[in-house]
Structures are given as C-alpha cells and as structure tokens.
C-alpha cells in the first residue's frame, strides 16, 4: 500500500515538474524527488492535524 502511494507521488511530482509553466521547479534526481515528496506529504498531514 505504501509503495503504491510512493509511486503515485512520483508520478504526480514528475507531472508537476514537467508542467511547462514551472521552469524554476527543480527535481534533478531521485534523492531530490523523494525529499520533495516527503516534505509535501508531511505538509498535507500536518495542516489538517493542526486544524482539527
């Protein structure tokens, strides 16, 4: 289950990074991709947790 979420996160992150209007967004390698995905996931978990 976690692997499916990780793969989905990579797909979404790659799609966002390849979006033509986002030239300054940098995802150069696997380590950058994983750390960006982890930070975004933590933000999505943290914000609702603080609100409720």
Image (tube, rainbow, N blue to C red):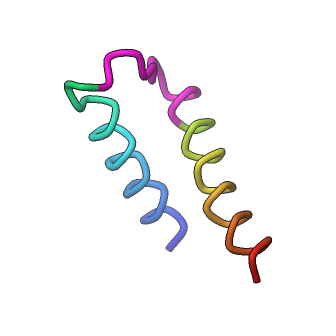
Taking the view exactly as shown, the residue that stands out farthest to the left is 20
Q: Residue furthest right?
A: 50
Q: Which one is nearer the viewer's eye here, 26 or 2?
A: 26
**Residue 42 location (% of width, % of height):** 68, 56
At 47% from the left edge and 21% from the top edge, which residue is drawn? 29
Write down the quadrant of residue 49 in the picture.
Answer: bottom right
**Residue beneath the point at 40% across and 46% down:** 10
Examine the rendered structure and indicate whether residue 2 appears above or below residue 23: below
The outermost residue toward the front is 51
Residue 47 at x, y percent in the picture: 70, 65
Query: From the viewer's perspective, is residue 16 above or below residue 27?
Result: below
> Which residue extends farthest bottom?
52
Which residue occupies 63% across, 36% down?
A: 35
Q: Residue 7 at what x, y percent from top left?
A: 40, 54
Predominant secondary structure, magenta span: loop
Which quadrant of the rendered structure holds the C terminus?
A: bottom right
The front one of 41 and 47 is 47
Q: Relative to the observer, which residue lies in front, 18 or 48?
A: 48
Rendered position, 16 above or below 26:
below
What range is drawn magenta here? Answer: 22-33
27 magenta-colored: yes
Q: Does the magenta stretch include residue 41?
A: no
Q: As drawn, is 47 to the left or to the right of 36?
A: right
Would residue 26 be found to the left or right of residue 39 on screen?
Answer: left
Residue 48, how many percent across, how many down? 68, 73
Q: In this view, does 12 lie to the left or right of 2?
A: left
């Amino acid at each position: 289950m976690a692997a499916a979420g990780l793969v989905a996160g990579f797909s979404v992150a790659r799609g966002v990074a390849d979006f033509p209007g986002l030239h300054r967004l940098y995802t150069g390698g696997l380590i950058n991709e994983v750390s960006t995905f982890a930070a975004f996931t933590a933000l999505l978990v943290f914000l609702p947790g603080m609100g409720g």
